[in-house]
Amino acid sequence: MRNIFSGLGFLRAPTPTQIVTAAETFNKNDDQDCDCSCGSPNVDTKIVGGDPSGVHEYPWMVRLSYFNQFYCGGSLINDRYVLTAAHCVKGFFWPLVKITFGEHDYCNATRKPETRFVLRTILGEFSYLNFQNDLALLRLNDRVPMTATIRPICLPTDPNDSYENGVAKAAGWGTLYENGQASCHLRHVDVPIVSNEDCTKTNYTGGLITENMICAGHEKGGKDSCQGDSGGPLMRQMANNRFEIIGIVSWGHGCARPGYPGVYTRVAKYVPWIKENTKEGCYCSQ
């Protein structure tokens, strides 16, 4: 798991019975569209020549805190739902999970970012044994405004795209190296996408990598997502310069180790399930 659960062990609580599973659904309304644009980065403030992300460069990035302690990331997908990893919320008392929006430097105590709490969590058939279906939807207690610093990321549009031979970005406030300290500033890293066939030939035990996962990382290591990045997005920039979320930071052996690429939940496999369970939210029309 690419998180900092080791520092939160005393905070774990029994899984609440109110958790909604994939088999359950909310009261559905017709799909709603909002007058906004998904996946549009703020490019004017990008820091040149480094890994730190520009201020509010990725306005869909959210930070999950438990008892005010940061532990996971996530992505805003519409005005009412956040997409994250199942292992970031399973076993936690979710009403105490606070979600922060529009933040870049979370060590800056003078800023007052937008915050929400979790009203419901929606999980699929997730298991810690194999990390299958490692995704969760967080229903917010109130809608979030669409602003210059808060905007959703686009969901994948092509369920058959393998993304092979492409380059994606992983972003988060996680540690800069294995067992290090979390970063105050949002950072990103470019990682090459590894085909599932090639990923099964790495140092991972056979059978761990499935079609519901996507691997990304350098063969010789050196750059990767790490602890605290769990639940955050693996993003691909499309031809129109917008970003779509193609993966969710899920698991890996250490961080940036040779022969062990990062493993992400393949979001395209779950778009119908995501759409079915987020109809209360308003998706960007553009």
Image: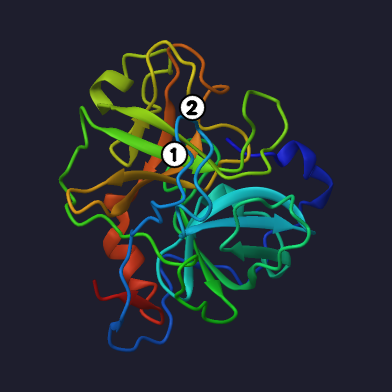
Crowd band around label 1 with a 10 angstrom C-alpha radius: few (<14), some (14–19), many (20+): many
Residue 23 image-quadrant placement: bottom left
Residue at the spot 25% in from the left edge and 55% down from the top edge = 156
The residue wearing badge 2 is 224
Q: Out of 19 and 95, give the one closest to the viewer.
A: 95
Q: Which mark is residue 170?
A: 1
- Residue sitting farthest toward the right: 10
Q: Kindly tell me whether residue 131 is visible in this rendering.
A: no
Q: Secondary structure at mark 1?
A: strand
Alpha-carbon span between mark 2 and mark 1: 8 Å
Residue at the spot 24% in from the left edge and 22% down from the top edge = 197
Q: Which mark is residue 5?
A: none
Which quarter of the figure is the N terminus placed in?
A: top right
Which quarter of the figure is the C terminus placed in?
A: bottom left
Q: Secondary structure at mark 2?
A: loop
Residue 120 in the image: above or below residue 194? below
The three-letter amino acid code for the residue at tag 2 is Asp
The three-letter amino acid code for the residue at tag 1 is Ala
Residue at the spot 48% in from the left edge and 27% down from the top edge = 224
- 76 left or right of 3 in image: left
